Image (spheres, helix red, strand yellow):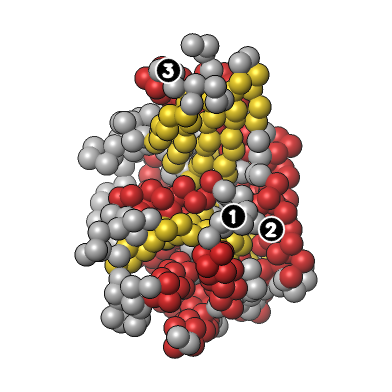
Amino acid sequence: MQDLTQQILELVRRTSTDLPADIENKLRASLAQEEPGSAAHGALETILKNVALARKNSTPICQDTGTPLFYVHYPEGTSTRKLRRMIQDAVIAATKKNYLRPNSVDAITGKNTGDNTGDEHYPTIHFEEVDEDQPLTIELMLKGGGCENVGAQYKLPNVGMHAGRDLAGVRKVVLDAVYQAQGKGCAPGVLGIAIGGDRGSSYLASKETLLSKIGDENPNPELAAMEQQITEEANQMGIGPMGFGGKTTVLDTKIKGLHRLPASYFVSVSYMCWAYRRRKMTVQGDEVRYD
Amino acid sequence: MREITIPISDETIRDLKVGEPVLLSGVMMTGRDAVHKWMNDTFIKKTRQPVGDDLEVYEAIKPILDGGVLYHCGPVVAGVETGEYKFVAAGPTTSIREEPYQADVMKHFNLKGVIGKGGMGSKTLQGCQETPAVYFHAIGGAASLIAQCVRRVIAVHKLDFGVPEAMWVIEVKDFPVVVTMDANGNSQHMVVDAQSQKVLEELLAKA
Ligand code: SF4
């Protein structure tokens, strides 16, 4: 198979330095809703200037370049072992070029590996096989520590919040997560929510929802309505960009339902900061396309 | 927008109110976990003896911090090998980690402000009133833009703490921040928290 290290390095560069259009447009629309001269307005203005500058200079949008999360769909017959090696090499090269900050710290010794490699979970790579005639796609999401720290997992029922094992209960705990996060996940953010699963699969799925674009319609109309309701209600709390107060706290909400054990009902909330870095590359034959 | 030049007078500081956006210009210094601990242990609580260049560095930073500003930031700096330093990315880091030290550091050095993100606690708020000083909130993640505001790296102390943990003396121009804790006992973080909690309770009561 062809060596894709350089092409994956380019994927990392784009992800770290060039914020996707759907997010930038949403930030711009939010700016228009905030009071000119307010702290919220100023924060969004600064954010948008920063986005433009990072793109122009090809420098990281945020200095915390986060955990690199790769999602790979590979055609039947591809060596995932080789793909993993290429991804790791690309990550090492991207760290040398300052597209990524050295972020991988051994939890036991406290030592930073210096090149963003670590163990089989760092960088995180998810593999999924597709048919032989399908293209190879690699999606990358960079998820910063500040927003990861405000993520939350709830177990329903939650007596304190009178939250039962239904969508009404889900709504309550998600709103609580937004309140708890305040501006600390670098609001405005996007909520990725998974309902069901076990603790592990639930968190995984909550992150996967963040691969879809802002404004992508949820195929389940009931969940689509709930996404909109949560976004609106979260914004009523007035936390605002950076927690300065204001109308823009949550840019969008994404929900996915999973299967669960009868005994468990988990709700996992992954919070993605405004520096919502995700990009995708598609390899078909010799051609590589980036979105 | 209000423009403020460092060093800052007590009158200016007392006049600042939470929620107010400000553009800062002048000379400031970065400092995060290692610096706060070093200041505290060596010169404030004096639990360790000064060693090596400790006293020299202390004398060098005193005039910068007197009436000055300390920035919670672990920058990405180019030119570390050559000594021709240039800030590449310089967003704020989470301030609350310095809560145990901040008020004492403010008072000891007569700081007029600290810059960071996420806000700080009641001990620092008290320190802001006593010093007086304010907490400036920078825009989390705006690393490129803030690096662009850094016009010049004047000096670096304790580079052996590591690049992000060292004390970088920098000259900035029009660094955008918002006052979120003022010298009159007000904290925007507490206000927003209380307001949003009220709305949350209403929403939770609704069905
Ligand atoms: S939460 Fe996001 S924007 Fe904020 S510092 Fe972390 S990566 Fe950057």
Q: What residue is shown with label 1? A: A274
Residue displayed at 59% across by 55% down: A274
- Visible residue check, residue B26: no
Residue found at x 64% / y 74%: A246
What separation in Å lies between label 1 and label 3 (alpha carbons)?
38 Å
**Which mark's residue is nearer the viewer, 1 or 3?**
3
Disc 1 CB within 8 Å of nearest ligand 1 atom: yes
Residue type at mark 2?
Leu
Looking at the image, can residue A168 be seen? Answer: yes
- The C terminus of chain A: image quadrant: top right
Which amino acid is tagged 3?
A: Gly
Labels 1 and 2 touching (C-beta < 8 A): yes
Measure how far apart labels 2 and 3 are at the Cα level.
41 Å
Q: Which mark is residue A77?
A: 3
Residue at x 38% of width, y 29% of height = A117
Report x, y in % for residue B117. Answer: 52, 60
Residue bearing the label numbered 2: A27
Q: Is residue A108 left or right of residue A218?
A: left
Pointer 2 or 3: first along the chain: 2
Q: Nearer the viewer, residue B127 or A18?
A: A18
